[in-house]
Amino acid sequence: NAGVTQTPKFQVLKTGQSMTLQCAQDMNHNSMYWYRQDPGMGLRLIYYSASEGTTDKGEVPNGYNVSRLNKREFSLRLESAAPSQTSVYFCASSEWLASGNTIYFGEGSWLTVV
Amino acid sequence: GQQVMQIPQYQHVQEGEDFTTYCNSSTTLSNIQWYKQRPGGHPVFLIQLVKSGEVKKQKRLTFQFGEAKKNSSLHITATQTTDVGTYFCAGITGNQFYFGTGTSLTVIP
């Protein structure tokens, strides 16, 4: 049981290049999320998917697109990378239960745009 | 929109001193959770508080949820070097998590 797995762990891009961050969870969770973390800014939600087949914008969606490929996988795409997108990206998943819910994070992807 | 503010942003303490971080929401929350992120790591769930005025303890950590369900605190007694990291609160409303900005704790041996 790996939990939430995201790849790549590290990536350097040139301005204008595109790339996709991959994420998969094996906990059969309905909800999946992409966050970015910057110093002093905490965790900011980029996009989320409440269930398979749906995606919604979070707090900072500009410059990103997502695909909920199936229940397990939720990818984040940067079409034309900008230096402002240098950040640590976390994929996460959760399940909504009457008893409560917990969000589980992947180990993070460190992205540098030069 | 929903905002969750957390203070202080940074805290340096001598090993053995106590530490407290505070979390405040602009709206009433269904429940609140706390997470810890070690340097270079990812946030990991610590605890969830659901009831108004709830207090929970985990060894040296004490978590409180305010009576109005709009604020919360995490208190660590007698900090140790293993407590180093960033502590996040997350307010939950509906099916959304709203993370605070985090408090980065440094423990000086």
Image (cartoon, helix red, strand yellow):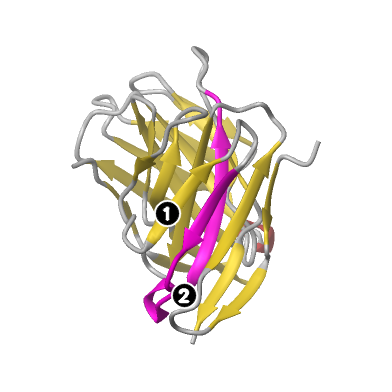
Quadrant in the picture for residue A20: bottom right
Q: Is residue B23 above or below residue A78?
A: above
The chain carrying label 2 is A
- Residue A17 located left or right of residue A6: left
- Residue A47 located left or right of residue A95: left
Q: Which residues are magenta?
A: A74-95
Residue A62's spot in the image, x, y percent?
31, 60
The chain carrying label 1 is A
- Work out whether mark 2 precedes mark 1 in sequence or the reverse, and give the earlier one: 1
- Residue matched to label 2: A86
Q: Nearer the viewer, mark 2 or mark 1?
A: 1
Q: Nearer the viewer, residue A6 or A55?
A: A55
Can residue B26 be seen from the camera position used here? yes
Number of residue marks: 2
- Residue matched to label 1: A65
The residues tagged by marks 2 and 1 sit, at their Cα atoms, a distance apart of 16 Å
Label 2 Cα neighbours within 10 Å, binned few <14 / some 14-19 / many ≥20: some
Q: Amino acid at mark 2?
A: Thr
Q: Residue furthest bottom?
A: A114
Q: Amino acid at mark 1?
A: Asn
- Residue A84 located left or right of residue B37: left
